[in-house]
Structure formats: C-alpha cells, structure tokens
Image: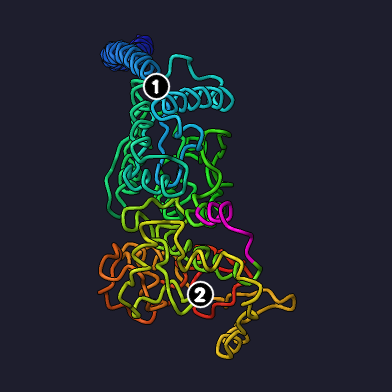
Amino acid sequence: MADEIDDLQLTFEALRDTEHAKNRLIEDLLGRLRRLCQELEQEKLDHDRESHFNREVQLRVKELKDELRLVKTRTERDAFILVLIDGDGMIFDDPLIQRGENGGREAAGILWGAVRDYVQQIMPDLTSDYKIVTRVYANLKGLGDVCTRAGILDSPTIMEDFTRGFTGSKQLFDFTDVGSGKDRADDKVSELFKLFVNNSHCKHIIFGGSHDNGYARLLEDIAGQATPNQITLLEGVPFERELAIMKSKYLFTRFDTLFRSTKINIYQQQYQQLQQIRPQPNSQSQSMSQMAPSYMSNLQSSHSSGLHNGVPDGLSTAFPVPQPQQTGYQSPYHTSMTRTPSESTNNSMMNPLAPTWANKVVSAPPAQTASPPPTPQPSTMENANKIPRNKFGQRIDPTIQYDKSEVRRVQKIHMCNVHFLRHDCPYGNDCTHDHFYKPSKNELLTLRVIARGTPCNFGSACDDIKCIYGHR
C-alpha cells in the first residue's frame, strides 16, 4: 500500500511539473503575441503615415510638373534672340546709309532675315515664334560728320534719316544715339550684354563689336555665366587681336553686304579727290602727302576704348586736315609751332582749289624749276638704324612682359597713349583722355602694351623710332 502511495506521489509531481511547463509556454506565447500585436499596430501607423506622405509627395510632384510645364511654355512663348551692336565700329555698308531712311528700313530687313537664317542653322529645335530684339548704339553726330567728310554722305542728316528708318521698320529694332563722349556706346553695350546673358527668355546673343579689344575683357568676365553656344561674335571689320584669339571659343559669323569690312579712312578719300583734279604726283611728293594721314589714322583706335573727340572707334582717323605749312612736311603730332595765317592761307581755306600746302604737295612742279627730292636728314637715318629688325629687314617690337589684370586696370584709367608715350598729343587740352594722371614706370610699360594692340599702318616697314603701335 505504501508503495502505491509513493507511485501516485511521483506521478502527481510529474504531472505538476508538466503543468508548470505548459503554463510557462502559454505565458511565453501570450507575451510574444502581445509584442507582435504592438509591432503590428506600430507598422500600421507607420504605413498610414508613409501613405499619407506619399500622397502629399505625389500631389506636390504633380504641382511642380504643372508649374515647370507652365514656366517652360511661358519661356518658349516669350523667347527672343538679342542682336547687340556697337554702331561706332560696326558701321552699316555705304550703299545702305546713303539711301537714308529707305536704306535704314532695308538694312533692318536684311539683318532680320540674316538672323533668322543663322538661328535656324545653329538652333533648329527652337520654336519658330521667337522674336528678334536688336539694339544698336552709336554717336550719330560723330558718325554722320565723319561719313560726310569721307565723301560717303552728302550731309550728316542722312545718317539720322537712316537710323529713323532702321528704328521704325521693326517694333523691336532700336538705333540709339548715345551722344558724344568716351565709352558711352561701350558702356551701354556692355551693361545690356550682362543683363541679358542670364535671361532665360534670351536664347542667344549675336554680339557685334569686332573693332574693340575692350570687349575681350567683357567676354572673360562672363565666361562662367554663359556657355559658348549662347553667344555668337558678329564680324564687321576684322576682329582685333585679342578678340581674334577668343573667337575660337565662341560661335562667330559675318553678314555680307550689311556691314563695312574696313574702317573709314577720311584722308584716303580726300587724297583720291585731289588726285582726280590734279596731275599725278611724283613718288617723293606722294609719299610726303600720304605720310601724315596714314600714320595719324592709328591714333584714334589706339586709345583704350570709346570715342575720341566725339568720333566713333570704327573710324580710322578723326584728325582735322593738316594746315598749310610754308616749311614743308612736319610731324602730325607736333603742335608747339604756330604761325599767323597769311592772306593766301585764308583764301585757301575758303577755296579748296586755291594753291595750298596740300595742293603743292600733290601737284607736279614745273619742269623748268624742278628740284631734286629732299635728302633725308642724318638724324632720321640714324633713328631708322636704331630700330630693331629681323634678317628680312622687317621691324620687330621688343617683347614686354605684362599682367592681364594690370592691363585691364590701366585701360580703365583712360590715359592718352600719345600724350604719355610720345609726349605730343595733337588734341592738347581738348583731348577726351586723361593727360593729368601721374603714371608709374610699370603703368607706362603697361600703357605701351595697350598701344601695341593697334597695328601700325606702315606695318613692318615703319621707320618712326617714336612709333607706339604694333608692327607685325
């Protein structure tokens, strides 16, 4: 009996242990279920939150796409091509300006058509409803006066008629008179260029300023703001040296029959007119008559930039006709010698056919009083021998080390090259460039670099030891 009780006790204890194990298992399962339920609730909350966020994002993306589509539509609808021209150097062709107001309308039509054809070539995907905005800035009075003196126009007012026709032919074409004064056209062109280079509506800029090295600095300043495909350099007269170097980085073109390809030479025209009414001069007198005008034509373009005495940069000279001299040829830069005009001089100023210094130079002397050509002065020959030349006899310019940033700084001072480097500026107190600045030796050296940017008309054959221009 006692053994049976012991067996029952063992069986009871075994069942009790099993019951405890079952309870622990159930408790563990309940705990895990509780945690899973909590995690499920959290996941539900997270899911709801993500769903809500995704819906908001989708709505925002849709709104942004709609806004982008609207902006793109507005940008394309108001797209335009900007044609920006410095009219002081980019001068319209002679036959156009000679026709006055009709020529202005014709020039505007030719320019509009040329721009349309060019844009179609470089931007074939651009919508066809884009506009062409043209801005031309120039000193009209100076330009008209010089064209008249050069024999291109009969009256300066024809230039005003031309600009009136140009402006009135198209609603977005403007030919603006900036008046006389240095850098007026340059400053307006530069500021307008900077204003539109980042304008999203402006799809392309066609920039006409091939005559002025100063625009090379403008292109350097905006190099990081615009891609090269956004700008086309328009050529009228051949690109100046610094622009010719930079043009490979941009698109460039020219519109034939629209702009002059050469600068206006006042004295060449006047000399040709004298040749038509006078016998052909001998070689010695011809070289003397051409020496002053040809060399003087460098002075205008040698200044840093802008107008000189109200005459545009695109003109090869803005000097008055040399006054008659009784002592023969003198340097055009020499202004210290003066004389009282005689009666014959006054008469010659009123009558262009009266005997004058210029007429005597270009007229063949009577055979019975002919004299041999003057022998060059020893000092002139000695100076010519001091000029460095290569083995072919061509003049070469000594190398000058310079800093581009210093060149830009000195250019902004607007010092008169002829006054500081030759010490004989013919304008004197009337010169529009600075004569009173006190340059250092380094600044004078930099000014010489700037002056060399203008090529000498005599080229490598130049014999003037004081010449400040470049010889290639």
Residue 140 falls in image quadrant: top left
36 to 371, vertically: above or below: above
Circle 1 residue: 79
134 to 155, vertically: above or below: above
Secondary structure of the residue carrying numbered label 1? loop
- In the picture, measured across the screen, residue 44 lies left or right of residue 134, that is left
Q: Which of the numbered marks, if any, corresponds to residue 343?
A: none
The residue at the point 66 percent across, 68 percent down is 283
> Residue 241 location, x and y as percent?
54, 57
16 to 444, vertically: above or below: above
Q: Earlier in the sequence, mark 2 or mark 1?
A: 1
Circle 2 residue: 467
Q: Nearer the viewer, residue 17 or 46?
A: 46
Q: Nearer the viewer, residue 57 or 185?
A: 185
Residue range in magenta is 270-281
Callout count: 2
